[in-house]
Image (cartoon, grey):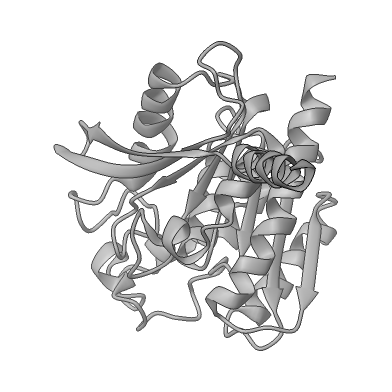
Amino acid sequence: MKYFILAIALFTYCNSTYAATVDTALTHSNAMHKDIKCVVIKPASYDGKKTFPVVYLLHGHSGNYADWISKVPAIKQYADADSIIIVCPDGHYNSWYLDAPMDSSIRYETYVSKELVSYIDAHYKTVQSRAGRAITGLSMGGHGAFYLAFKHQNVFGAAGSMSGGVDIRPYPLNWQMADLLGSYKEHPENWEANTDINLVHLLTPNALALIFDCGTDDFFYKVNVALHEKLLYYGIPHDFIVRPGAHTWNYWANSITYQLLFMKHYFDSAKQ
């Protein structure tokens, strides 16, 4: 009998320990005149009373809002363990999270940094300041996370990138980016103004808590090393992690654990 009771207790513990809830929210963008879905993961401790910090988690090129929760379902456990809300917005399959100079229908900088943040703060119990907001993402989303955080430091206090396209200029013929920015030959100013590595001048030491990583077999490896070296040159503190790996979900499933731990430490320190 005692073993039966123990088994029931263990079952109850396991199911209550990782009991994050997943919402699919329908948000609206006035800038783009359309509704946009996003996944919102609430920790088990979310009771609608106390406030929680938020990590905005961006998908990559050709992805959507459901990528992270379907490919790395363990993020529900991480939301529980760290007592954070995780928000996974839809960033279009190819927005690069820009307000695109050549396409007025692409306004994802405005959407994520303003409209989505306002929606989440209005509908969930969140820490409504940069001290309670972080942003990270993979590949295109890594570019987007740094791009948005560098340009909107009043909104986000911490930022990360996983295998990020942190310098898009070496890839003028890839991923239909010319549809957003024009061809590099005809509109080089758009490419220069919208690449992460050229936004380092917006940073001051310790203004943002920064972490990024890239696998040594990743095609974005060299541009990540270049960003690391530029941040060192400008004296901007950051965590840069290099380890074996390629541009794969296996790599990102590992990477997100380090990223969220970093964000958790930032949130804890910001409360002190």
Looking at the image, residue 146 sits to the left or right of residue 240; the answer is: left
* Residue in the picture at 37% in, 81% down: 174
Q: Nearer the viewer, residue 144 or 19?
A: 19
Q: Nearer the viewer, residue 263 or 250?
A: 250
Q: Nearer the viewer, residue 189 or 247?
A: 247
- Up-down relation of residue 216 to residue 25 (above or below): below
Q: From the top left corner, tell me how far across and down residue 267 is, in percent.
A: 74, 31
Q: Is residue 19 visible?
A: yes
Q: Which quarter shows the N terminus?
A: top right
Query: In this view, which residue lies farthest toward the front?
Result: 1
- Up-down relation of residue 257 to residue 104 (above or below): below
- Up-down relation of residue 155 to residue 191 (above or below): above
| Quadrant in the rendering for residue 38 | top left
Looking at the image, residue 244 sits to the left or right of residue 154; the answer is: right
Query: In this view, which residue lies farthest toward the bottom?
Result: 217
Q: From the top left corner, tell me how far across and down residue 86 is, in percent.
A: 53, 41
* Residue in the picture at 47% in, 58% down: 68
Looking at the image, residue 126 sits to the left or right of residue 59; the answer is: right
Q: Is residue 204 visible?
A: no
Q: From the top left corner, tell me how far across and down residue 30 is, in percent.
A: 20, 31
